[in-house]
Amino acid sequence: MESLDAEIIRQNLAAVAPRAADVTSHFYALLFLRRPDLRDLFPPAMDVQRDRLLHALIRIVGDLENAPALSNFLGQLGRDHRKFDVLAEHYDLVGECLVSALARFSGETWNATVEHAWVRAYGAAAGIMIGAAEEDAKTNPPHWAAEIVAHEKPADDIAVLTVRPDLAFPYRAGQYTFLETPWWPRVWRAYSIANAPDPQGLLTFHVRSVPAGWVSNALVHKAKPGDRIRLGAAMGEMVVDHLAPNPVLCVAGGTGLAPLKAMVEELAYYGTDRFVDLFYGASAHSGLYGLEDLLRLSQRVTWLRVRPALDDLTLAGISGGISDVVSEYGPRYDCDAYLSGPPAMVLDSARVLRRLGLSSSQIHHDPVLGGYPAADAESPTPVGAEAPG
């Protein structure tokens, strides 16, 4: 994108930021007024959907001058929108409604130059999304039907679900996908996949029920073997290069363990000789539901060390919360770090790692703003195993 257009759009989004909720609400009102039939593509409650649109816009604007990152994000977004039954013909109307909503709430800052910059930017973004969706349609369905084959509850508010997709489900360890349950049609929530790809094609998810969490509560308290769910395409860029030589540092909080567990499994499958230091924290002992399995694995291999952490407690001789433990037992400067868990924990741990000498390019996590799996949170932004629940 031209740097001038990027700056114009950035300034306009900053100008409407105080009324961002009005912009997204007006956008959807216009969309459904012009095409009432499109309302059926969306969930009954639109609050999460409105937030998701806003965070996607923020993510896109942040990458306007980073063509590879923006293209990758938009391509992923286009593929993911297939599960909503979004068609190429819908994009023009969406663009018109978005520009109209921005114009309404931009006040005197809106003019022909701003409008043309948004039209050009949206046209380019829509083209990438449509192209990615059409390419994906050649090999993949818009969504995958799957059967729950196992349902375990290591804690009252946590379930470990194993599902078997009807068709092969392509993904990498560390990625996440959106789930839709039969109890809440059209309500999709993001969960990280907790196992590396295996020959049986099974997928495991770690789900924590959270207050007012429609999907999370259904999966933890209602779901049982034999129930059917739907999956969107795999998403996320937090994948490990199993051929790289650097040591690996993993920092997991609660159900944020899910993608990191999958990555450790993948490293084990490829016979890694890279040292892996896994810090695993929670606010209560029940939150460390996967600790025993990790400790058993660390006893079988020489390259894995597990460091548990409980807030305000001493566990296995280690005291303090997860960020404190990471700070005390800091990593080697040449490691690659992967973070997954509640957004506050991820941001705090990233700050600790930078203070210890790691560069931003060495620290990997799904976006805290505009991403999707936000572990232990029913919010529209991910980092870890679960987002909007």
Image (cartoon, grey):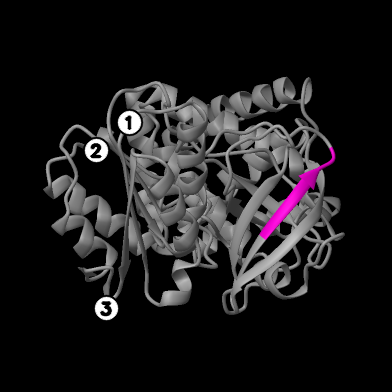
Q: Residue at x 39, y 63 (%)?
A: 18
**Is 92 rendered above or below residue 160?**
above
Q: Quadrant of residue 224?
A: bottom right
The answer to whether 108 appears left or right of 222 in the picture is left
Q: Quadrant of the C terminus?
A: bottom right
Mark 3 vs mark 2, CA separation in Å: 30 Å
Secondary element at tag 1: loop
| 10 Å crowding of disc 1: few (<14), some (14-19), many (20+) | some
Q: Quadrant of the N terminus?
A: top left
Mark 3 vs mark 1, CA separation in Å: 30 Å
In the rendered structure, which disc, 3 or 1, sits on the residue that comes first in sequence? 1
Count of picture labels: 3
Residue bearing mark 1: 274
In the rendered structure, which disc, 2 or 1, sits on the residue that comes first in sequence? 1
Residue bearing mark 3: 313
Secondary element at tag 2: helix
**Is 296 rendered above or below residue 266?**
below
- 12, 52: nearer the viewer: 52
Q: Amino acid at mark 1?
A: Arg
In the rendered structure, which disc, 3 or 2, sits on the residue that comes first in sequence? 3
Q: Position of residue 14 (x, y in %)?
A: 35, 51
The answer to whether 218 appears left or right of 254 in the picture is right
Q: Amino acid at mark 2?
A: Ser
The answer to whether 111 appears left or right of 50 in the picture is left
Mark 2 vs mark 1, CA separation in Å: 21 Å
Disc 2 vs disc 1: which is toward the camera? 1
